[in-house]
Image (tube, coloured by chain):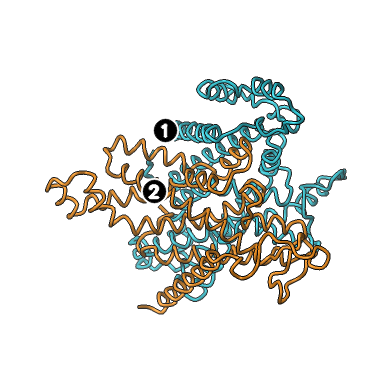
Chain colours: A cyan, B orange
Amino acid sequence: MLRFAAARARQTAIVAIIVTSLAFFLVHAAPGDPFSTIDTSVESAAARAEMRVRYGLDRPLYQQYPAMLMNFARGEFGTSFSQSRPVSAVLAEVIPDTLLLMLPALTFGVLLGVALGTWQGARAGSSADRGWSTVTLGVLSVPEFLIALIAATLFAVRLGWFPATGMLRIGATHSSFADLLGDYLHHAALPVATLTLTIACAVARFQRTAVIGALSEEFVRTARAKGATDRRIIMTHVLRRTAASLCAILGLLFPALIGGAAIVEDVFAWPGAGHTLVAAVSSRDYPLVIALVTVGSIAVCVGSALADAAAAWVSPSGAVDA
Amino acid sequence: MTQASRAGRRTGIAAAVILAIIVGIALIGPTSFGRSASDSGDLRTDRLSPPSAAHPFGTDASSRDVMARVVQGTRVSLGIAVLSVGILFVIGVAWGGLSGLAPAAADRWMMRLVDALLATPRLLIVLAVVAFTGRLAAPALALLLGLTGWAQMSRVVRARVREVRASDHVVAARALGTPALSLFLRHILPEVAPTAFVMAILAAAAIIPLEASLSFIGAGVAPPTASWGVLLRDATDHPTDAWWLLLFPSVVIATTVMCVNVLGERLQPRDRNFLAR
């Protein structure tokens, strides 16, 4: 197990380095830089050249890139253009808020998705199964931001049941922890529900396929021959069998999930990393964008590695493929 | 044929027909209906007017015909999707084919790059590029989406190439001394092609929402080009007073992606689930 962890950590580091280099070189392969489009009537050519020097953009790429990696490794992300403070301070502020959105959504989404997918897989081919398959495919065909937009328009703007934006009431002082929690839950309801819905539908589709596959295996026939009830076969034998592939699938879902979550945050003006990223992109706050993208990519790599480790851990055969 | 699979086939055909209609309308373009996506009507009387006989989808805040804008947006969004799928198809098949035929050590490293790309949040990478260079023109955006999207394709193609490579007719052709290139093009590729086409359809189903999301947050195609995402972005300015701005683009985008998804699912061979491996 320890050897597996070490191998997986090394692999994750390699993947993380490839991902960040990819981001870096794609960014620099494109023409222009953050200072080439600043209003030329306000900023003189000399001022722009000075900015390039300050941010090291005048140096060749093979020097910039290692310099950037070294700085990132030391936790120095530079200064945000738009917020005029260290990028690390911004990160420390927004990442916890993103976790407050992602963790509940991931938990509910996986639980609901597994429940629905298992239920469908156990009665595959029935009209109920086909109906739910259409529903899940339909939900996955709508981009997350659109679900968020429709939810915000319907439940926040029209019906006024939930606030449309933010994480807490602006300027409010909370008298007690219960008050604070209630305020958070009221604000989190719509964004968490949006993300939960898409995660649940994606998970349900994979889980359904996995359950159908597991049900056709020998061990199910054995269990049935021993007189196990349908319920017991599903709850103990099949679910244990599908747990490994579920973890693997979650690892594959992370990259798309983090992008979608960023946009859902933006629609609801949730004060997390995604909303900050979108704002930083439109104000062309290059240091903040690069830092957020790097952190996001590393989070995905670590998430995938954890998902793989979990898959290996729950795998009934114990087979570990580092 | 069971009842379920017959129903599935009907769904597949329906999806193909609807998709063909949407693509057909997009190809013909809004001008053929005597409409323009950019002309404003009378700013005093036509501004934000609800759907009517003259404007079946209503008009927007600049008195433009929403139906014409949706058709125009379909052209842009589908154009970007087709172009980027074309790019990722070529790269994915080439890389996957090469990796499938390569010796084990090279194969392992080639797939490691694919793993890295699969772990890449594409939306974040595109945002990084846009933050650095400013908004991209539609072909540049398509290129970027294609360059970051070929990993899944190459992984599935590689797996299929490995299977086909071991089959009798390929082994026989190899024994007869067929050169590597023609072995790949004439004996392996034809068997890999159906799989690659299904992957291309699934890739399109992922790229359309991705491009819409980018345009929605203002990081997609540069103005004045308007894709679906731009239309939805415009709709957010009028959350209460103009439901048609949100409804019609939403319906078109959801219908299109749903049809692409259904088509990809129906064409997928029954015995494999590409994404679940």
Could you tell me which residue is drawn at 74 percent across and 48 percent down?
A269
Label 1 and label 2 in one chain: no
Q: Chain of mark 1?
A: A
Q: Amino acid at mark 2?
A: Val
Is A322 positioned to the left or the right of A288 in the image?
A: left
Which quadrant of the view contains residue B244?
bottom right
Q: Which dot, 1 or 2, sits closer to the camera?
A: 2
**Residue A59 in the image: above or below residue B248:** above
Q: Chain of mark 2?
A: B
Helix, strand or loop at label 1? It is helix
Could you tell me which residue is drawn at 76 percent across and 70 percent down?
B50
Q: Nearer the viewer, residue B61 or B205?
A: B61
Q: Nearer the viewer, residue A244 or B189?
A: B189
Marks 1/2: CA distance?
33 Å
Q: Amino acid at mark 1?
A: Ala
**Residue A171 in the image: above or below residue B20:** above
Q: Which label number is shown at residue B90?
A: 2
Helix, strand or loop at label 2? It is helix
Is B66 positioned to the left or the right of B93 in the image?
A: right
Q: Nearer the viewer, residue B129 or B273?
A: B129
